[in-house]
Amino acid sequence: MSEQDGMDDWAAAMAEQAESEENQGAQEDVQPAELDEFTEDAPISSEEKRKLDTILDIPVTISMEVGRSQISIRNLLQLNQGSVVELDRVAGEPLDVLVNGTLIAHGEVVVVNDKFGIRLTDVISQIERIKKLR
């Protein structure tokens, strides 16, 4: 692709955006959406608090996944100290944070007091996590 073709594409995209903005200005029947105000929910009852306390103490397994690889059993049996296994991730790509095998976040490795940790960089929304469970 030549530089001229790239400029033509850019010019076409700019013209399309300008046309779209003009059409938006011509639409006078557009009304702003009315949203309900968020209100403070009533405090939870002691029964609800007891139920919540019950599930808050359930232990879960949290793990960080650097990457994955598929190898044959033959190659697996040939692994020894110093062997390198290529993973499906690029260096610098965020790690997956899994709770009981379900992806909940992405993060990066940090060192805190000579121990490894993970800084969460992107937490998967509750809606997305629920969709993955189904």
Image (tube, grey):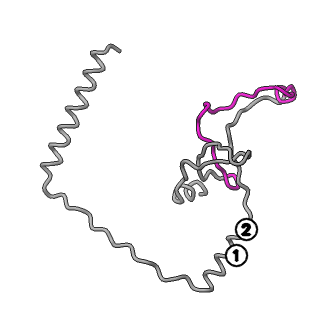
> How many residues crowd mark 1 within 10 Å: few (<14), some (14–19), many (20+)?
few
Q: Is residue 85 magenta?
A: yes
Q: Which residue is mark 2?
A: 58
> How many residues crowd mark 2 within 10 Å: few (<14), some (14–19), many (20+)?
few
The N terminus sits in image quarter: top left
Kindly state the secondary structure of the residue where label 2 is placed: loop
- Magenta highlight range: 74-101
Q: Residue 73 lies in what quarter of the image?
A: top right
Which labelled disc corresponds to residue 54?
A: 1
Q: Is residue 129 above or below residue 5?
A: below
The C terminus sits in image quarter: bottom right
Q: Residue at x 67, y 76 (%)?
A: 53
Q: Residue at x 59, y 40 (%)?
A: 94
Hey, what amino acid is under mark 1?
A: Thr
Contact check, label 1 and label 2, Cβ < 8 Å: yes
Q: Is residue 95 above or below residue 86?
A: below
Which labelled disc corresponds to residue 131?
A: none
Residue 20 drawn at (x, y percent) = 20, 41
Residue 67 drawn at (x, y percent) = 67, 37
- In this view, the residue farthest toward the bottom is 46
Kindly state the secondary structure of the residue where label 1 is placed: helix
Q: Is residue 61 above or below residue 93?
A: below
Q: In front here: 129 or 94?
A: 94
Hey, what amino acid is under mark 2?
A: Ile
In space, the residues marked 1 and 2 are separated at their CA atoms by 7 Å
* In this picture, residue 26 sits left or right of residue 111: left
Q: Is residue 73 magenta?
A: no
Residue 88 drawn at (x, y percent) = 65, 32
- The dominant secondary structure in magenta is loop
